[in-house]
Image (cartoon, helix red, strand yellow):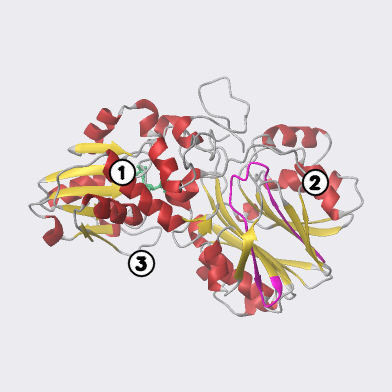
Amino acid sequence: MLDKFEDECGVFGIYGHPEAANLTYLGLYALQHRGQESCGIVASDGTALRAYRKMGLVSDAFKNNAVFEQLPGKNAIGHVRYSTAGGNDIKNCQPIMVDYVRGSIAVAHNGNLVNAQELRNELERLGSIFSTIADTEVIIHLLARAQSDSLADRVIDALKRVRGAYSLVFLTETRMVAVRDPNGFRPLILGIVDGAYVVASETCALDLIEAEFVRELDPGEMIVVDKDGLHSYHPFDVVKPSPCIFEYVYFARPDSTIFGREVYGVRKESGRQLAREYPVEADVVVAIPDSGVPAAIGYAEESGIPFELGLIRNHYVGRTFIEPQQSIRHFGVKIKLNPVRGVIEGKRVVVVDDSVVRGTTARKIIKMIRNAGAKEVHLRISSPPTSHPCYYGIDTPTRTELIASSHSIEEINRYVTSDTLGYLSQEGLHKATGGCDGGSCEGQFCTACFSGDYPVKFPRLKSDKQLGLF
Ligand code: AMP
């Protein structure tokens, strides 16, 4: 058992387009940042479902045109997945597809269920045999056992038993169903292209295929798309929505609009707010690319300190590289990033990143910047200290590995070797989302990774380890 949740994912679906599989592939291409370990597409031609799933990046998995001949039909769903230890196996790739007594069904899931293990134990006692370690398979088993007549009702029956985070897209021979959990943890967007409905984790996937943005699914909304069009339902008990604030901080692409705001604008405003909260006398603002760039621009604008590209990223770094025999110190970070000496030498440098997880990146980069001749290095983080693991679909290490769970800001400052360190406050981050005009900002988002305040409760293990799912 892992002592943490392990999935980060992106989902896509399209109904009623002659190039369904091809557009799904492009949608996944745009969502690649949400998961790089495996990807897959399931397509329907109205009578049967066909799947193609592979480990690796979308560009590698679908490099052969012939793949699309294996995925005929006007309807398709797709998935990109990132998983850590234990889950990086082809059999856990999504969409999951099964045949059962009522036909075939496939599902793509972004999120994590907090009662999956409980349900899995119960289903196994009743005779279910699981073939993956994904919590998504629990939903399939519940759906297969549901007794209601219509697909919509069976999906509702199944989902009424699960708790946690889910943005789901299902495909049967003749229907596509998309659902967002009642808390609305993960985004799910509705669009339309050439009269065909599209759903995707983020709007950047709509942009690439030139689909028009229609709206976001509401928290707790389910849509069913079939030959008669789109039908919307709100079948679950209403709870206070808690979309994930970390989508704004790090996870979503800056060119996407989610939860009603463009991500880029929120990140830039976080940087501005950070400059108000933690000003410093300095000569240059530098971002840790790519995640720190919008906030660094905001910090520079607000502080009046010029923004420069002080660290250059090599965009062609793969997952592994062969190191020279004579070992090079900090090779991993050096192969990815290199400082521009002319920007840094002799300067007081403000370094901006979106978050600190274990502290490794910041420590290595500060060392690199000092080696390039910086006089002072001031680290500014455009989110509050990440002190608690995510149980709703963002990959974070265990609590003990999160540096902010056991170290004060002063201790972190010493560890990463910055001259000063400033984290954006929770209030400041809320302000940057623009979502708390005049009133309290509390409770508008899930901020569990910063506050430990988990909106959907989960069982705790006896040890101090966090709950393990699979
Ligand atoms: P660390 O070196 O462990 O402190 O990680 C910090 C870096 O990881 C920052 O540059 C963040 O942009 C990035 N980061 C934050 N959250 C995640 C995540 N869930 N998955 C991958 N990278 C992340």
Q: Ligand 1 near label 3 (Cβ, under 8 Å)?
A: no
Which label sits in the foreground, 2 or 3? 2
Q: Secondary structure at mark 1?
A: helix
Q: Amino acid at mark 3?
A: Tyr
Q: Which residues are magenta?
A: 172-196
Q: Position of residue 336 (x, y in %)?
A: 30, 58
Distance between the alpha carbons at the discs numbered 2 and 3:
44 Å
Q: Amino acid at mark 1?
A: Leu
* Looking at the image, residue 354 lies above or below residue 59: above
Q: Amino acid at mark 2?
A: Ile
**The magenta stretch spans residue 195:** yes
Q: Which residue is mark 2?
A: 156
Q: Position of residue 339 (x, y in %)?
A: 20, 58
The numbered mark at residue 89 is none
**What is the crowding at mark 2: few (fewer than 14 residues within 10 Å), some, or many (at least 20)?**
many
1 or 2: tag closer to the N-terminus: 2
Whether the residues at callouts 2 and 3 have beta carbons within 8 Å, the answer is no
Q: Position of residue 285 (x, y in %)?
A: 21, 53
Which label sits in the foreground, 1 or 2? 1
Q: Which residue is mark 3?
A: 316
Q: State the residue lying farthest toward the left.
A: 346
Camera-side residue of 398 and 31? 31
Camera-side residue of 212 and 205? 212
Residue at image location 24% in from the left, 48% down from the top? 351
Q: Secondary structure at mark 3?
A: loop
Q: State the quadrant of the N terminus.
A: top right
Q: Which residue is mark 1?
A: 274
